[in-house]
Image (cartoon, rainbow, N blue to C red):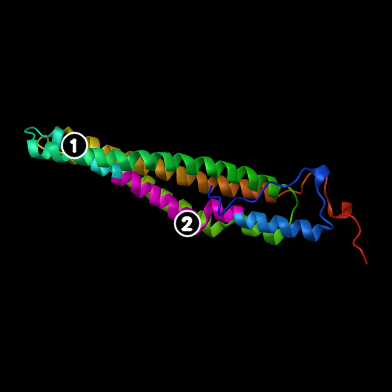
Amino acid sequence: MSPRNPLPPPPPPTELQSWPDRESRLADRALALDVLGRRLLGGGRLAMFLLWFFLLELGWSLVGVLLISIGQSLPDPLMLLTGLVTAVLGIGVLVPAVWLTIRSLRLDRTVRERLAQWAALDHHGPTDARLRAPALSLCWLLLSFAMCGLGLWMGFAVPAGVSRHDGYGLVAYGMGVALILWVTGLTGLAKAVGHYRLAVRLTGRRPAGRSASSEPPRPG
């Protein structure tokens, strides 16, 4: 996570909570849930998700030049040399893209854990409705479903459409593109469905041991 945009800290333990009234606690809860929700499903997070995907595809495409040249029945030496150069560049793109993707998944897990802690702190209808974010969840769901569908189609279409003259390098490249689409799409689907189910479960119940009647009397 960026030090310029740190995540909201987890809520303090019950014995250390010092909100003067429930309204103050709900205000802090709403602010934390809003920030965490945007970090998990917001437009910026979606843009980063697509950026890592395009970097993965770009890196694999550069490596694919070498695979295609090797797989030809009569490899061209100049094509092989070009493939070696592009493969080095591709690995230079692919390795950071894989690392950034894994780092993003770990950050998502941290955000979900912190979001669950803040959501379980109390219950408030309007805030909880925003937490479910059905429009953003649907956007992630449709985009990820399209990626999975395209990856699945390519997994069958590429081997069937490649002739013997094209060689097995093109098949390997196409299957790699399909795998990246499939895995990325599954990641997005799990993210969208998991967030919505988590939000429904957390906001559909009252926090244990707290109710409106247990609040301290308001002054004045």
Tell me the kind of residue under disc 1: Leu
* Horizontal side, residue 161 vs residue 220: left or right: left
Q: Give the camera-side residue of 6 and 170.
A: 6
> Please, which residue is most extreme toward the right here?
220
For the residues labelled 2 and 1, the Cα–Cα distance comes to 39 Å
Residue that appears at 69% across and 62% down: 126
Q: Name the residue under label 1.
A: 84
Q: Is 171 positioned to the left or the right of 152 in the image?
A: left
Q: Is residue 192 left or right of residue 59?
A: right
Q: Indicate yes or no whether the magenta region holds residue 193.
A: no
Amino acid at pointer 2: Cys
Q: How far from the left and from the top, in percent, is residue 51?
A: 39, 51
On the question of residue 152 being in view, the answer is no
Which residue range is magenta in the image? 36-58
Residue 87 place in picture, x, y as percent: 23, 38
All told, the count of numbered labels is 2
Residue furthest bottom as drawn: 220
Dominant SS type (magenta): helix
SS for tag 2?
helix
Q: State the residue in front, 153 or 174.
A: 174
Relative to 123, say whether 165 is above or below: above
Determine the image quadrant of residue 26: bottom right
Label 1 crowd (10 A; few <14 / some 14-19 / many >=20): some
Q: Is mark 1 on a helix, strand or loop?
A: helix
Residue under the image location 72 percent in, 57 percent down: 28
Q: Which mark's residue is nearer the viewer, 2 or 1?
A: 1
| Circle 2 residue | 139
